[in-house]
Image (cartoon, rainbow, N blue to C red):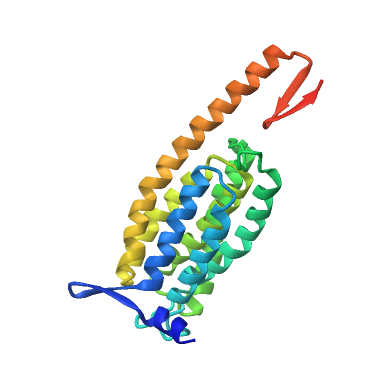
Amino acid sequence: MDILRWLFDAQIHIGDQSLLVPEVLGNLFGLLSALGGMRRKVWAWPVGILGNLLLLTVFLGTVFGSPHPINMLGQAGRQVMFIVVSVWGWYRWKQSRDDAGTAVIPQWASTKERVFLLVALLVGTGILTPIFRALGSYEPVWSDAWIFTGSLLATFGMAKGWVEFWLMWVAVDVVGVPLLWSAGYYATALMYVFYGAFTLTGFFVWWRTRNRELSKMAQVEIAFPDVTVNSGEMQRK
């Protein structure tokens, strides 16, 4: 318990500003998870879950007796959502992992799926905003609701292997930076700036990977005309 109390209370002082150690560690684990996701490695999921647990304690500052006693219910709920969806994503990627440890072949979402992502983002934000406001979340509450909904959809898209999930993260980061900075969560705000550039990079990496996979499939079909290739799996025609 003493170790946990120290972890909750620990701060890094930079000039007249302070950074919470759990906030810094949680974001570092999140970054490591994102790197693993870019490389399509299964270990990205459990590492991300550990980061989510740390950040949950940060955004429920009054519950855990944090030196920064501000509750951001959308951000806290986002961590719980991450954990739940990540368990599913972890299982999904583990089931499809190949011998090299690569878990998923990137694919483009269909037009219907893209419309679903956009509509779900707008509707989810609209529904959650008054709920978060009633619960006393930090203003502007719509930003908190946007971040929560976008994060849920991005994590779902990552588990499905959609290339577009990276763009959903960009949408989250654009809103998240000013919100978190205004609330005094400077480490997380700065990490969101970095995440924005990182997620754009991830988008192009997965795009190129998808093109390479399509090229491989085309070569297999040319060499073996009696075999059809679907998402990396060969089936007899």
12 vs 135, left or right, is left
Query: For this view, does 170 lie left or right of residue 107?
Result: left
Asked which quadrant contains residue 227, the reply is top right
Which residue is more in the foreground, 193 or 124?
193
**Image: 162 above or below 19:** above
In which quadrant is the C terminus drawn? Answer: top right
Q: Is residue 31 left or right of residue 130?
A: left
Q: Position of residue 100 (x, y in %)?
A: 61, 38
Is residue 125 positioned above or below 132 on the image?
above
Name which residue lies at 66% across and 39% down: 98
Q: Nearer the viewer, residue 32 or 191?
A: 32
Residue placed most toward the observer, 140 or 161: 161
> Picture coordinates of residue 41 (x, y %)?
56, 46
Q: Name the residue at 47% across, 51% down.
A: 34
Q: Nearer the viewer, residue 133 or 221?
A: 221
- In the picture shown, does residue 89 fall above or below 21? above
List the single residue furthest toward the left.
Answer: 15
Q: Residue at horizontal 43%, vertical 75%?
A: 58
Farthest residue toward the right?
A: 237
Looking at the picture, does residue 11 appear above or below residue 103?
below
Question: Could you tell me which residue is drawn at 58 percent across and 21 percent down?
Answer: 215
